[in-house]
Each structure stands twice: as C-alpha cells, then as structure tokens.
Image: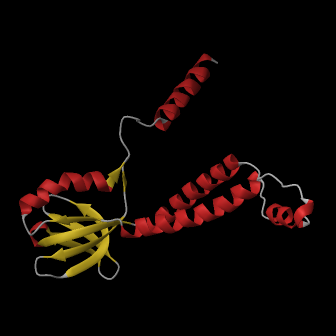
C-alpha cells in the first residue's frame, strides 16, 4: 500500500510540475501596423509591418507575400495602426455616450408650469410640452454626444500615423530601431 501511495504521489508531482508555467519569461505580442515605405529610388510599397532587424525591414504584402527592404534603400516610411479608425470611433462613442448620460442625469427634471388664465394656459402648455425628465435628457444627450464622439474618434483614428524619415542612411535607421521595436512589441 505504501509503494502504491508513493507511486501515485510521484506521478502527480510530475504532472503538476509539467503544468506549471514560468512566470518570469515575458510573453510578447506583435502589434499590427500598416506601412507605406518610400524607397530611395522613389518607389512606394504598402504592406503590413512584420519584423525589423539591424539591416532590413520585412513587410507582408498582399500581392507578393514577404518582402524585405534593406535599410540603405529606405527614404521614409509611415506606420499606421490597423483598424485605427474603428477603434477611435468606438472609444469616441463610449466616451461621448457616457458623458451625455452623466450630463443628462445631473441636469435633473424640468419644472412644470402652472397654467395662467391670462393667456388661457397656452404658454404653460407649450413649456410643459418640451419639459423633459432627467432620464429623457440622459438618452438625448447620450445619443447626441455619442454620435459626435464616434465621428471625431473615427477622424482622429484615420489620420493618426507616425512618419519616420531615414533618407537611405543606415545610422539614422539604427537610431530609430529601438523606438520602432517599442512600438511593435507589447507585453
């Protein structure tokens, strides 16, 4: 019985030790960027940024697959996050809607007027027709500011890009390489 118990404990120890992950090893994920590269001979290439090393940039192009561009052939390149307009629109929608709801609820209910016999209650009826509760104001302001926020966020996301000018100089490329790696890799 002791041998069987010892065997079970040993087997379980092996399984448990294999299931453990080393938490000290960082797990990196590549960010996705769409890139426009202008070469020294004034050609333009579009693709997705795949990798960078000391001497070249690797792009994935939809037509040719992976394409390498040597550092001395790069005049400039422009990086833009993939789906940045959509992400900007969603962030703007969320912020605008939340702000509109808070403003609508904070403004409270509109007071109702009592009809006066001097104008047969017409002024009070018109005023009361446009009176809103705090909930109605929250919905109206949430829709209005949410739509505005989505439009502004989409515009900002669409125009947000980063341009790097290399000029065919390998030294300039190496100076920018650390910044590019920080942009590409996220933990």
Q: Horizontal placement of 176 versus 97: left or right?
A: left
Q: Where is residue 58 in the image (x, y as percent from the top left)?
A: 24, 67
Q: In this view, does 1 lie to the left or right of 86?
A: right
Image spot of residue 30 (x, y percent)? 35, 56
Q: Position of residue 53 (x, y in %)?
A: 18, 59
Residue farthest to the top, as pictured: 2
Q: Which residue is drawn at 61% across and 53% down?
A: 98
Left or right: 47 as drawn, with respect to 144: left
Q: Residue at x 24, y 79 (%)?
A: 45
Q: Residue 39: image x %, image y %? A: 15, 76
Say if residue 83 shows up in the picture.
no
User: Does residue 160 appear to the left or right of 129 in the view shown?
Assistant: left
Task: Check the image and name the residue furthest to the front.
Answer: 118
Residue 103 in view: yes
Name the one closer to the observer, 93 or 163: 93
Looking at the rendered structure, the number of numbered marks drawn on it comes to: 0
Report which quarter residue 32 is drawn in. bottom left
Query: How are the colours assigned in the image?
Result: secondary structure
* Residue located 58% across and 66% down the image: 147
Pick the residue in front: 21 or 175: 175
Q: Quadrant of the N terminus?
A: top right
Q: Going 77% across and 53% down the picture, which residue do you hit?
A: 110
């Amino acid at each position: 019985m002791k041998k069987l118990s010892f065997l079970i404990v040993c087997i379980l120890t092996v399984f448990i030790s294999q299931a453990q992950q080393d938490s000290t090893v960082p797990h990196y994920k590549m960010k996705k960027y769409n890139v426009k590269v202008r070469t020294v001979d004034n050609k333009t290439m579009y693709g997705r940024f795949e990798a960078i090393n000391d001497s070249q940039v690797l792009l994935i192009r939809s037509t040719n697959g992976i394409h390498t561009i040597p550092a001395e052939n790069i005049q400039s390149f422009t990086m833009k996050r993939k789906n940045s307009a959509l992400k900007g629109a969603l962030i703007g929608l969320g912020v605008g809607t939340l702000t509109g709801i808070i403003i609508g609820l904070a403004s409270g209910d509109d007071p109702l007027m009592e009809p006066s016999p001097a104008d047969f209650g017409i002024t009070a009826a018109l005023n009361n027709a446009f009176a809103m509760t705090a909930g109605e104001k929250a919905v109206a302001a949430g829709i209005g500011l949410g739509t505005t926020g989505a439009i502004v966020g989409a515009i900002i996301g669409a125009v947000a890009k980063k341009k790097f000018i290399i000029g065919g100089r390998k030294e300039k490329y190496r100076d920018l390489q650390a910044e590019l790696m920080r942009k590409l890799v996220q933990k």
